[in-house]
Amino acid sequence: MAVRAAGRRAREVRDGLDALGDGAEFAWRVASGALSSRIRRYLVEVLRQASLLITGSVLIVLGLVFALGLAIGIEGAYASKIVGAPSVAGAFAAIADLREIAPYAFGYMMAAKVSTGYVAEIGTMQIAEEVDALEVMGLDSVLFLCSTRLLGTWLILPFVYAIAIVVSYVGSFVAVVMQVGQVSAGGYLELFWKFQSPQDYLFSGIKGMTMATFVVLVGCYYGYRVRGGPVDVGRATARAMVVNLIGVHVIGILGSQLFWGGMPRLPIGG
């Protein structure tokens, strides 16, 4: 029994490593295709995918960011009140919204709304043999189905992310200044602007876009690799969501450690 269990675990590890290698190779193929000149053949599809992101996902992402901005503002307001420094809520919101809340909200909603949608859409095409039909017609199915979606994401999401940061700031301001009302707008904004820098915006954008790129690639991979029937599409969607959640947190942890772990860049002390 012990030998059999060890053999089963070894097979699971081997299968996991094979899947990891296959996913990495697929991601490289999709990303390189999105950056190659061959994508020009499918610019109409790129723009269509970008428009679908705008009409179908932007408001949902911004709604979650606003709600989390409100939550951060309330937490910061009462936490700063406990230590007797209510204006510190502005610094708390500046740090939390820009460095953590906006990237994570972006990653969560991209995983839940966009990535799983790609799995279902491409997976359904796969089991209906539409992908094979594209290959018969002479089209590069990976380029047409996956690289176009990734490039459409890259075209739209930097602007959406910038808006999301503003929306999270507005949510925290409303919670601290207008709802809790323990600090004036001037007192809040004085510390709010001191505890952020242009570098922080750049690093936050890199963190958020890395999460978005990851979840799009995961969605395309699991959708393209679907085999079987509708049940397999559902299983692939569930697997993609699990991988997305793990990946978003790993990227978030590594990003925070890389960008702010060694030098937090906070105007405290000398």
Image (cartoon, grey):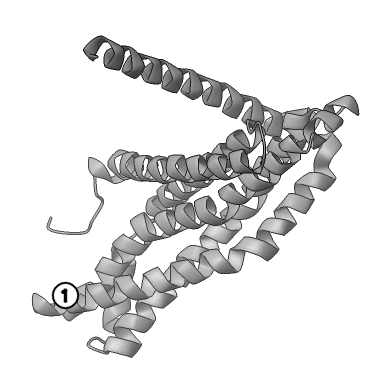
135 sits to left or right of 79: right
Crowd around label 1: few <14 · some 14–19 · many ≥20 (10 Å): some
In the image, residue 38 lies at what x, y percent?
A: 80, 29
Residue 3 shows in the view: yes
Q: Residue furthest right?
A: 137
25 sits to left or right of 67: right
Residue at the image point whose x is 59% and y is 69% from the top: 59
Residue 191 shows in the view: no
In the image, residue 251 lies at what x, y percent?
A: 39, 41
Q: Residue furthest top?
A: 3
- The total number of labels drawn is 1
Q: Quadrant of residue 131?
A: top right
Residue toward you, 147 or 129 = 129
58 sits to left or right of 134: left
Residue toward you, 50 or 1 = 1
Q: Which three-letter amino acid code belongs to the residue tagged 1? A: Ser
Residue toward you, 151 or 188 = 151
Q: Which residue is mark 1?
A: 80
Q: Quadrant of residue 176?
A: bottom left
15 sits to left or right of 257: right
Q: Quadrant of the N terminus?
A: top left
Q: Residue furthest front?
A: 1
Q: Secondary structure at mark 1?
A: helix
Residue at the image point whose x is 16% and y is 75% from the top: 80
Q: Residue furthest left?
A: 83
| Figure check: 221 above or below 149 | above
Residue at the image point whose x is 25% and y is 67% from the top: 92
In the image, residue 190 lies at what x, y percent?
A: 29, 75
In the image, residue 228 lies at what x, y percent?
A: 66, 33
Q: Quadrant of the C terminus?
A: bottom left
